Image (cartoon, rainbow, N blue to C red):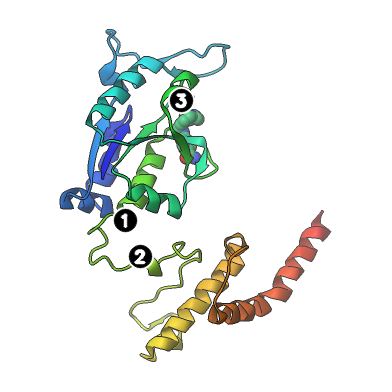
Amino acid sequence: MWLGVLTLLPEMFAAVTQEGVFARALSAGSLSLECFNPRDFTEDKHRTVDDRPYGGGPGMVMMVEPLQRALDAAKAKAPKGTQVILMSPQGQRFDQQMAITASQHAGLILICGRYEGIDERFVSQYVDSEWSVGDYVLSGGELPAMTVMDAISRHLPGTLGNQRSVIDESHLDGTLDYPHYTRPEIVGAQVVPSQLMSGDHNRTKRYRRALALQRTLERRPDLLTGRLFDPLDRQLLTAAALQLGPHTVEEEREKKQDH
Ligand code: 4H7
């Protein structure tokens, strides 16, 4: 997969290119990354990339022309069909399914905004989609772009070591991850759950599934709504709901009393 990034701060991307899954995907050749700095595509002495907002107000806005030229340079190197994505607080919420889908594309161009934002005429003319990594505002799109890049790189062939099927992982099947333990067996007053010590693979599997479902119900019930479950999952979820039921009803009652 080919990744192009438009950024005024290309040095930031050392954070993902120097170590970790993304770096290994680069070394393995299943991924390549090229940064394009709009400042390198300016023609004035001061290499200006921003200007004051029409209509007034605080801060500066990224100008169309340097972005346009940087994007042209990126597109000249991009594979056919490469999508142009703007990292933006106004974007569609980026999730695991989008990471998987994107990892199957030949190319992707990620645009990182700075200052107060980007001239809307550039966005409407060149951007195919806007993605957000969460409902908060950051000072630039670089960290969101790296977040997306890391999530995507984990799904490229040969990156997850032995292709250990990512199926077991949190979010892929719409449930949160189960808790993990390693040596030593005892830490202070806490021991490793006996279900993981028996060596009985089916018992371990069932225990982990029970905890994954229980935690999802407890922490992210929104992930469970509208889903279909096989008989074992239904049984584990029902047991979890029975444990949780009075607790959440109580919380709802308290919430109502508070108001
Ligand atoms: C596009 C438009 C993504 C990109 C405006 C980007 C959060 C996310 C940015 C802006 C981002 C996310 C520039 C508006 C900085 C705010 C102070 C870059 N923030 N910004 N201003 N949630 N910021 O994915």
The span from disc 1 to disc 3 (Cα, nearest Å) is 29 Å
Indicate left or right for 30 with 201 as reference: left
Viewer-closest of 85 and 147: 85
The spot of residue 112 in percent (x, y) is 39, 32
Are there few (<14), some (14-19), or many (20+) residues within 10 Å of tag 2? Answer: few
Q: Are marks 2 and 1 in contact (CB under 8 Å)?
A: yes
* Residue at screen point 39% across, 50% down: 101
- The residue pinned by badge 2 equals 166
Sooner in the amino-acid sequence: mark 2 or mark 3 = 3
Q: Is residue 190 visible?
A: no
Are there few (<14), some (14-19), or many (20+) residues within 10 Å of tag 1? Answer: many
The span from disc 2 to disc 3 (Cα, nearest Å) is 35 Å
* Residue at screen point 42% across, 87% down: 202
- The residue pinned by badge 3 equals 123
Which quarter of the image is occupied by the N terminus? top left
The spot of residue 61 in percent (x, y) is 46, 19
- The residue pinned by badge 1 equals 154
The span from disc 2 to disc 1 (Cα, nearest Å) is 9 Å
